[in-house]
């Protein structure tokens, strides 16, 4: 009886063919590890950077540096010791095409944010107050670059590595790609529901944006296009056009005031909480499809467990 019980437990926990934890357990452990690591980061950041955190720009930049290090180490550890695969196999093969994907994704997000900005002006939902970068004794170019690293590049790397990399691809091995896409998008939306000024609509729309990021991986088999889009979206939304970045405020080049229904404009949360974002997401999907038209795409990159 004990032998049978142990055998059943082993079969539930382990993939007998690959001799490793089943995908569902790996994802569950990863999701449990993330808040633990986040708590540790919160303890580390303040004494590590000290009084410099009084400067908002330095605060977000330093936070970004620590988040990138932590996310990379966490995903690497799980990928190496639980998945028994390499970190690059998540879609981090870097070459000339990868660099182009990053640039195209970045530019596409700039176009998306710019279209939203112009549309809101045309419908008189947005009024420009000032175009000026009010720095803190730091060169405006340097400060914008630090904001880009802190809330653009750092968040893009960390979230894409975790969601479109580790979580999505492991779920795909466990429950199949279609269900994995649905579940990872829902998890992504729920995660952002904890952000300031979030609404039910923002959660739903971020589910849609989650698929936009997945689409980049589906079309290329790599994470670079999605990372470029994510970094550009955060930079152009906040530091450039002055919108909220998923409910978080940042220093910005353009200062404006919003009026009209929040369900259209997104209000203080940012365009991700307004239906104004839906047409530009559809446009982005079309552009990404055209850009990757001759690619082989994901193919059989995710194999479901037995």
Image (tube, helix red, strand yellow):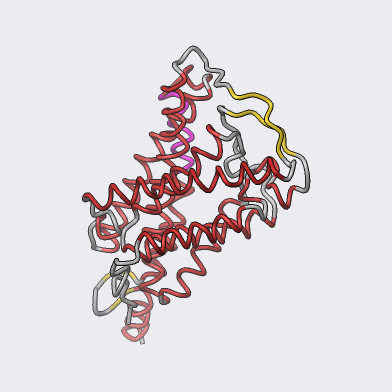
Task: Name the residue furthest right.
Answer: 260
Indicate the quadrant where residue 118 lies. Answer: top right
Task: Name the residue furthest top.
Answer: 137
- Residue 95 to residue 214: above or below: above
How many numbered tags mark residues here?
0
| Residue 64 percent coordinates (x, y) | 43, 35
- Residue 165 to residue 230: above or below: below
| Residue 140 percent coordinates (x, y) | 47, 20
Q: Residue at x 41, y 57 (%)?
A: 30
Write the start and end of the magenta stretch as one range.
Answer: 38-48
Q: Per the image, is 44 magenta? A: yes
| Residue 200 percent coordinates (x, y) | 69, 56
**In the image, 197: left or right of 62?**
right
**In the image, 254: left or right of 172?**
right
Q: Per the image, is 259 magenta? A: no
242 or 292: nearer the viewer: 292
| Residue 132 percent coordinates (x, y) | 57, 21
Q: Residue at x 45, y 39 (%)?
A: 152
Which quadrant of the figure contains the C terminus? bottom left
- Residue 64 to residue 26: above or below: above
**In the image, 105: left or right of 35?**
left
Which quadrant of the figure contains the N terminus? bottom left
Task: Name the residue furthest front.
Answer: 122
Q: Principal SS element in the magenta part? A: helix
């Amino acid at each position: 009886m004990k032998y049978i019980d142990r055998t059943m437990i082993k079969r539930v926990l382990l993939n007998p063919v690959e001799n490793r934890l089943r995908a569902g357990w790996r994802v569950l452990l990863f999701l449990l590890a993330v808040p633990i690591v986040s708590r540790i980061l919160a303890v580390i950041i303040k004494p590590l950077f000290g009084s410099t955190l009084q400067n908002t720009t330095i605060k977000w930049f330093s936070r970004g540096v620590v988040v990138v290090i932590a996310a990379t180490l966490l995903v690497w550890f799980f990928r190496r010791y639980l998945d028994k695969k390499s970190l690059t196999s998540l879609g981090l093969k870097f070459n000339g095409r990868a660099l182009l994907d990053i640039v195209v994704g970045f530019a596409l997000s700039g176009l998306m944010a710019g279209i939203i900005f112009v549309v809101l002006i045309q419908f008189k939902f947005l009024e420009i107050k000032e175009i000026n970068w009010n720095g803190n004794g730091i060169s405006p170019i340097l400060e914008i670059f630090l904001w880009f690293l802190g809330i653009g590049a750092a968040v893009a790397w960390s979230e894409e590595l975790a969601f479109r990399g580790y979580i999505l691809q492991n779920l795909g091995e466990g429950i199949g790609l279609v269900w994995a896409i649905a579940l990872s998008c829902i998890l992504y939306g729920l995660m952002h529901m904890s952000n300031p000024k979030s609404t039910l609509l923002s959660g739903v729309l971020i589910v849609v944006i989650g698929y936009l990021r997945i689409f980049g991986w589906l079309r290329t088999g790599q994470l670079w296009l999605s990372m470029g889009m994510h970094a550009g979206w955060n930079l152009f939304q906040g530091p450039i056009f002055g919108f909220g970045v998923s409910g978080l405020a940042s220093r910005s080049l353009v200062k404006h005031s919003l009026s009209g229904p929040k369900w259209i404009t997104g209000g203080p949360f940012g365009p991700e909480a307004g239906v104004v974002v839906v047409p530009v997401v559809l446009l982005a999907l079309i552009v990404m499809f055209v850009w990757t038209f001759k690619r082989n795409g994901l193919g059989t990159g995710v194999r479901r467990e037995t």
